[in-house]
Amino acid sequence: MTQSKIRQGTLVGAFTTAALMAIFYVAEQAADLPFPPFDIFQWISRILPGFLITFGIDRMIDVIRALNLGQTDDAAKLAEKMMAITLVLIIGAALGAIFFNYQTTDERHRKYSRILLPGAVMGLLVGVAVSFISDRYNFTSSVNNTLSGVWITVVFIVWGVILNWAYNRLTTPTPVPMTATPDMPEKSVQVLDRRRFLLILGGATASITVIGSGIGAYLNSMKEEVLVKITGANPKDFPNLNDKLVPVPGTRPEYTPLEDHYRIDINVSIPEVDLDTWKLAVGGLVENPTEFTLDDIRNNYEPTYQYITMSCISNRLGGDLISTTHWTGTSFQHILNEVKPKPEAKFARIESVDGFWEYLDLDLVRNDERIMLTYAWDGALLEAKHGFPLRIHIPNRYGMKQPKWITKIDFVEEWDAGYWVARGWDKDALIKATSVIDTVAVHDVYEQNGSKFVPVGGMAWAGPRGISKVEVQVDEGDWAEAELRQPLSDKTWVIWRYDWPFNEGDHTFHVRCTEGDGTPQITSTEGTRPSGASGIFKQEASL
Ligand SMILES: Nc1nc2c(c(=O)[nH]1)N[C@H]1C(S)=C(S)[C@@H](COP(=O)(O)O)O[C@H]1N2
Ligand SMILES: [Mo]
């Protein structure tokens, strides 16, 4: 009895939870209400210990690469969504099992079950708990938190009531005098009846799930983010248009199309900031605490325009978590002059909508006018996923030091670990020089002066430290210098090419680079954690 109860409870819990999520999804897409499974995932990913999160992310990237699932960031976000939904499904199934198992058959208590009270109470408790999680970890919904809480709680109460109703239906013998016959005794009729009920319930919940997901997906596909162009920025006025070096076919685009720019952050749903209420609050140890609107920042200070290559510290050698675009903002020094940090202020603590934070050394800000509060990319205000309305650029650091969706900057005396630093990553996160072969263009072989050449191409990058030399080695041969294309700026990757007079066969190509000041790149192979990947990139090709 108990076993079959648990089995039935698991089934009913899973069925009803799937339908529940579909309903949340439709409400999210139609009315901008929260989608609790993602909020729960965002909560869990913030409270789990850092090593577990990093381990999880590493294995996820392993799988994405092993199965060739496309762009790492897109595949990772999809995987996170699937994990979130699976997790909630498992919790729902477990709650169903627990509920079925602990319902008592004692007649005095059964009367409560008959009026569906235990289910309603369980739904209420779960709903309230989930509402609290959503309240803190949803950064996407525009509906006020009380209303969202009521909505979530009501839906969960309905879910609990249905669970309870299903329990009653499956455990109370239905009167079946008409159908029981000598060859079909009452007991088998009851079993058949239960099976039929489970089938009907399964069919109904599956229909809700499928139709709900369809409607949600359709509504989602109707949405389109409008890019708000800004004046003054001319991203496509590339400064190196006249450079004679033609990148080898198959080399990554020198300027990443905006839609292809990598995205990495701790959120499953993209945080949505409402400009009507958003302000940048700058305070702490300052003479003049100030709140800035986006217009203040855009209109009151000289804008700066910079082509920037940014990389995630988790980018593996040759990985796709690195991109180049055109950034517009204003120097952080302007803000410093406005708020006037007190002498004891040593760091800026930068905080974001999503609970992300980082520390920035004020001496660094004073000595580097390129540190920039950024509001536009590629000539338009930031897209939501890239940190609308405000993010920061800090040269020479990996992405993890550079918050998006900034809401608050506090000047403080003491340094502390930022979000990823607290989870075991490098506290400085300085960019490592790396070079990568994008292509050995075996289909673009050409002949010149009696020799056959294969063009080899890729990029090298050392952040704002620049690249002075790129060299290619084929098999065990000598390192030969590649040609460099003038980069978009002194902060972007450098596109290079090397035309090798080849002999037929299988070959191994290696690449290495030298920084602007002559420092050779690190050649020893290191993984991404804790300080970023390094090593000599290798590619095989048959000619
Ligand atoms: N608020 C916030 N800012 C953030 C993050 C985040 O999770 N939350 N992730 C950081 C990391 S790890 C990287 S690599 C960059 C990526 O910026 P992008 O997604 O616009 O490419 O954002 C950084 N800023
Ligand atoms: Mo990152």
Image (cartoon, rainbow, N blue to C red):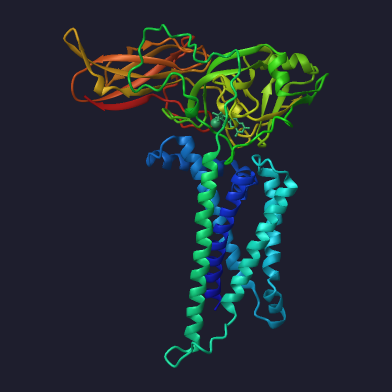
Tell me: residue 420, above or below residue 89: above
In this view, the residue in front, 15 or 64, is: 15
- Residue at 18% in and 22% down: 504
Quadrant of the drawing holding the N terminus: bottom right
Residue 370 pos. (x, y %): 62, 14
Q: Quadrant of residue 468?
A: top left
How many dots with numbers?
0
Tell me: residue 508, above or below residue 246: below
Tell me: residue 295, above or below residue 68: above
- Residue at 37% in and 7% down: 244
In this view, the residue in front, 332 or 179, is: 179
- Residue at 60% in and 34% down: 420
Furthest residue to the left? 450
In this view, the residue in front, 102 or 34, is: 34
Furthest residue to the right? 287
- Residue at 63% in and 70% down: 164
Quarter of image, ligand 2: top right
Using the rendered image of the protein, determine whether residue 311 is visible from the camera's viewpoint.
yes
Residue 536 pos. (x, y %): 39, 24
In this view, the residue in front, 182 or 211, is: 211
Tell me: residue 225, above or below residue 122: above
Using the rendered image of the protein, determine whether residue 426 is visible from the camera's viewpoint.
no
Quadrant of the drawing holding the C terminus: top left
Furthest residue to the bottom? 182
Residue 14 pos. (x, y %): 54, 62
Residue 135 pos. (x, y %): 70, 46
